Amino acid sequence: MFQYTLDIFSDSASVPISGLGPVSVPFFEPDLASYDHFLIAFSGGKDSVALVLDLLERGIDPEKIELWHHDVDGREDHGNFMDWPVTADYCRKFAAAFGLRIYFSWRIGGFKRELLKTNAMIAPVAFETPEGVKVAGGERGEVATRRRWPALSPNLRIRWCSGGLKVDVMSIAINNQERFRGKRVLVMTGERAAESTNRAKYLPFENHRCNAPGRRVNRTVHVWRSVHAWSDEDVWAIIRRHGVVAHPCYYLGWGRASCAACIYGSPSQWASLRVAAPEMFGVISTMEGELGHTIQRDETVTQRADRGRAHDMDPETIRIAMSRTYEGLIRVATADWHLPKGAYGENAGPC
Ligand code: SF4
């Protein structure tokens, strides 16, 4: 089996990283013609949009491209606990605008069920496939009580939201689809070195944990972080080139489209969420009290919001972001495109 180690990265790119200055990161271009499926971890944020647009510019057959969106809040609660209500429909309409397939997947019960887990195993995963929704996983975990927010850590075992609600969900959905057997699959994720020193350490290309090249499964799965060496400017340039209207949160002033109530939220983001979605903010604040455990170690979300200053937000854009149906445009003429005010804003959150 071919081992992907640092010595295959014969090329490198210099990337400016906040607080560190320019850092050299490895750079790699796989042979794209050799893959049968391109699975894009599509959050609806700018980096995942850039992944898609870059693939299309490279001439990859859209039939081979699949957008995979993980619903952090699940589907069972009929409401949003952590994420922007509009995100799922924004992703759906983005896919439709580019004629691409999109598949949704989620941990049953979502973030809230995992947060409140009491004497239970982790929930199974539901995932859409070309043949309909399937359910897998959640059978072998240990019985445990959680009732604690995810830790603010790069370790996905204790930052259980990114691991359990996104990364593991994708792996379960790949491992449980026969259609990937005997195929070469390229998983694409949008981490960029410029976002953090932790992400600067990610390899641009490696074996995915679902890689199973042995005769029994015969499935090749690689991960390619095609935008790993890209700057913010590169990302916004390709979005502009295609006239893509970014997720509404960027127009409200957020610099990243992670969960609306991301555990990494800055004081200004919590202050903005309190204005844009007072009910959502209130539920999280109440939950901190009920659990006797706060997201940040040393302050409640209310104390954190009190330290921040809310963005100056347009009420109509708030309404769009908080709606479960995306009513805005996905594409406009380049001449009509404008940079969202959050484009180069705070870089808070790892997802
Ligand atoms: S965006 Fe934030 S809260 Fe949501 S899954 Fe990622 S780290 Fe967790």
Image: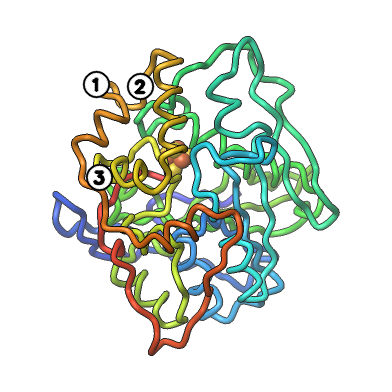
Are the residues flagged by discs 3 and 2 in contact, CB closer than 8 Å?
no
Examine the rendered structure and indicate whether residue 188 appears above or below residue 258.
below
Distance from disc 3 to disc 1, alpha carbons, whole Å, reads 17 Å
Q: Disc 3 marks which amino acid?
A: Ser
Q: Which residue is mark 2?
A: 294
Considering depth in this image, is 110 or 200 the residue closer to the camera? 110
Disc 3 within 8 angstroms of ligand 1 (CB): no
Report whether the residue tagged 2 is closer than 8 Å to ligand 1: no
For residue 291, side relative to residue 110 (left or right) = left
Q: Residue at x 47, y 81 (%)?
A: 242
Q: Position of residue 133 (x, y in %)?
A: 80, 47
Q: Quick check: which quadrant has ligand 1?
A: top left
Residue type at mark 1? Asp
Q: Quadrant of residue 62?
A: bottom right
x and y percentages locating residue 197 in the rendered image: 26, 46
Of tags 3 and 1, the one toward the viewer is 3
Residue drawn at (35%, 41%), measured in percent from left and top? 274
Three-letter code, disc 2: Thr
Location of mark 3 (residue): 268
Where 288 sits versus 13, above or below?
above
- Per the image, the residue denoted by label 1 is 298
* Spot occupied by residue 332 in the image (x, y as percentages of width and height): 48, 83
Query: In this image, 99 relative to 311: left or right?
Result: right
Total numbered circles: 3
3 or 2: tag closer to the N-terminus: 3
The image shows residue 233, relative to residue 48, as above or below, that is below
Nearer-N-terminus badge (3/1): 3
